[in-house]
Image: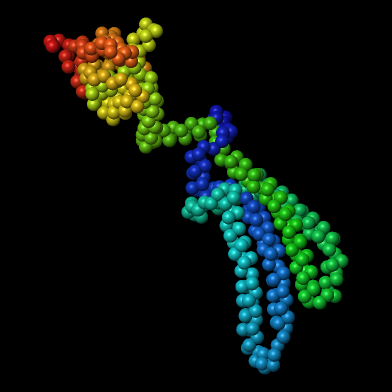
Amino acid sequence: MAESPGAEKTEKPTARRLRNAREEGQIARSREVPAAAITIAGVVVLFMMGPTWVKHLSSMMAEGFRFDSKALQSPNLLAPIFAGQLMEAFVLMIPLFAVTLVVAVVSSGITGGFNFTWNGVMPKFSKFNPLSGLSRILGTQALVELLKSLGKFALIGAVLFFQIQHHLQELLSVGSMGLQPALALAGNLISESVLWLSLSLLIVAMIDAPYQRWSFMNRLKMSKQEIKDEMKDMEGRPEIKQQIRRRQREIAMARMMQKVKEADVVITNPEHFAVALSYDPSSNGAPVVLAKGVDFSAQRIREEAKTHGVQIFEAPPLARALYFTTDLDRSIPEALYQAVAPIIAYVYSLSSFQPGGQPMPKPRPDVPKNMRFDADGKPEFPEGTDA
């Protein structure tokens, strides 16, 4: 059967796909990063507290080989003595345990962040399928993990080999040393060896972390058809549609309000309706509606007009006529030219008025009967009726 068009997974996963994968417990994880971080943290603590530990442990070991006559006569005392020394050694190592625990938790979230979901711990019956298990064993991911393990083993083995070669004479002389010098030498050799091992693990982690991120994103890639289906599914939800419409209204409102400052006059109802008009004297065109609104939108338009010094002219019938007959960014109807022209001339006369001059009388626009509407947009004089 031929593969349907767009079935090839070549597109990056969408935010929804990533969110769903995260809810199912699928995130980018690198086991090498926590391993390297814990080892390095342990080495740091070892270097900082190593001398103190060697001193205390050597004293404890020497004390453990001393038995007084009371302990020899009462063998039951040996167990409490041993338990006390064991507890003392445990308390001595608490800083190491605490640091490694904190580093383990923090480093686990470096590659994919912290995530806890019950879906990740719930049993999945698909994992019990022998065929899927065989595909995981023989798949590309298993081959990569095998190569990574072999490379890590070879790197660590090489580091240990060079360390032994470099300190071979010192290791052979440990048997002829006293207890404390031998412990001190062993501590130094172990610290140095672990340091080099941790650096080698850091190299592995720096390679593995980007690979795991790339592999995770590659597994979640989507086909073009899957992206289309997801968009249809999201846009089909009522709440998504509602959010989109609300956002569109907000954007349209903000864009319209920005145009109010370019208007020459705002004609109002005066409270319920507001229409902002702009007129270009250099052109032969009619005035253009830049913004219009009712109630709250009308109030916003009036406030913007006052802020930017745009003239506000109260003409209720004309405001309703302009609102119900003209769309945004469109010229007013020809039937309203004679009603709007005196208002434009009056506004221009106010801007050019000189002190001591005769002001132009405020016009009283006459709106044709077929252009008169009530607050609901219904004609005040339907066809076939007289004024």
Residue 327 in sight from this viewpoint: no
Q: Residue at x 49, y 44 (%)?
A: 20
Give whichever of 156, 337 is nearer the camera: 337
Q: Residue furthest right?
A: 169
Q: Is residue 80 above or below residue 183?
A: below
Q: Residue furthest front?
A: 356
Report the coloring of the rendering. rainbow
Residue 81 in sight from this viewpoint: yes
In what quadrant of the picture does the C terminus appear? top left
Q: Residue furthest left?
A: 386
Residue 64 occupies which quadrant of the picture?
A: bottom right
Residue 33 percent across, percent down from the top left:
64, 52
Is residue 343 left or right of 12 when viewed as pictured? Answer: left
Q: How many marks?
A: 0
Is residue 191 left or right of 338 when viewed as pictured? Answer: right
Residue 330 occupies which quadrant of the picture?
A: top left
Give whichever of 362, 318 is nearer the camera: 362
Q: Residue at x 19, y 11 (%)?
A: 369
Give whichever of 287, 222 is nearer the camera: 287
Give whichever of 367, 360 is nearer the camera: 360
Q: Is residue 199 above or below residue 268?
A: below
Is residue 337 left or right of 43 when viewed as pictured? Answer: left
Q: Residue at x 78, y 76 (%)?
A: 179
Q: Residue at x 78, y 65 (%)?
A: 189
Residue 309 percent across, percent down from the top left:
34, 23
Residue 386 percent across, percent down from the top left:
12, 10
Residue 311 percent across, percent down from the top left:
30, 20
Q: Is residue 16 above or below residue 300?
A: below
In what quadrant of the picture does the N terminus appear? top right
Residue 186 occupies which quadrant of the picture?
A: bottom right
